[in-house]
Image (cartoon, rainbow, N blue to C red):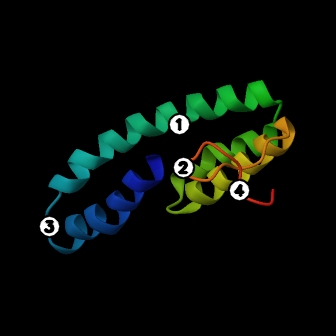
């Protein structure tokens, strides 16, 4: 969610604010992104603590929520790390089962 809202803010809100002098999107989405980012930070810290992530990885994942599209990359990498540490295979959407052949 943080990534989606940040993209909306940067791709829609900022151009409207600075090119069309229409700040309503930024004033609406901006605080929502801020709230979601605080939740993201707390969730990242919780996950990092539970999984024993080193401080550098934890900080990098936390900062991923500030750069458009990077939060999606970070989510995939962290999910792969957590799955590997748990020894579980990725699940196919909607099936609750691992991918065939894995």
Give the crowd class for mark 3: few <14, some 14-19, many >=20 residues within 10 Å.
few
**How many numbered marks are there?**
4
Q: Is residue 84 left or right of residue 6?
A: right
Where does label 3 land, which residue?
21
The span from disc 1 to disc 3 (Cα, nearest Å) is 30 Å
Q: Residue at image x 33%, y 58%?
A: 9
Q: CA distance from mark 1 to mark 2?
A: 8 Å
45 to the left or right of 20: right
The residue wearing badge 4 is 99
In the figure, residue 84 lies in which quadrant?
top right
The structure residue drawn at horizontal position 54% and vertical position 49%, both measured from the top left corner, is 65
Label whose residue precedes the other's in the sequence (3 or 2): 3
- Check disc 2 and report its element: helix, strand or loop: helix
Q: Residues within 10 Å of mark 1 (few under 14, many from 20)?
A: some
Q: Earlier in the sequence, mark 4 or mark 3?
A: 3
**Residue 18 point in image, percent of width and height:** 24, 69
Give the mark toward the camera: 4 or 2.
4
Instruction: Identify the residue position indicated by label 2 in the image.
Output: 65
Note whether 101 is above or below 36 in the view shown.
below
Question: From mark 3 to mark 2, how far is it between C-alphas?
Answer: 26 Å
Find out whether the residues at labels 1 and 2 contact each other: C-beta distance under 8 Å: yes
Q: Nearer the viewer, mark 3 or mark 2?
A: 2
Q: Secondary structure at mark 4?
A: loop
Look at the image and tell me in which quarter the C terminus lies: bottom right
The residue under the point 72% across, 47% down is 78
**Badge 2: few (under 14), some or many (20 or more) residues near its Cα, within 10 Å?**
many
Q: Residue at x 52, y 52 (%)?
A: 66
First in sequence, mark 4 or 1: give its number. 1
Q: Secondary structure at mark 1?
A: helix
Q: Which residue is mark 1?
A: 40
Counting residues from the start of the chain, the first of labels 1 and 2 encountered is: 1
């Amino acid at each position: 969610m943080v990534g989606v809202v940040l993209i909306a803010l940067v791709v829609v809100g900022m151009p409207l604010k600075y090119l069309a002098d229409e700040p309503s999107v930024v004033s609406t989405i901006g605080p929502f992104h801020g709230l979601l980012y605080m939740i993201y930070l707390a969730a990242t810290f919780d996950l990092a603590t539970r999984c024993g992530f080193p401080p550098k990885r934890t900080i990098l994942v936390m900062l991923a929520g500030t750069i458009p599209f990077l939060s999606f990359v970070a989510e995939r990498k962290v999910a792969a790390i957590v799955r590997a540490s748990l020894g579980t295979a990725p699940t196919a959407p909607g099936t609750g089962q691992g991918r065939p052949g894995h």
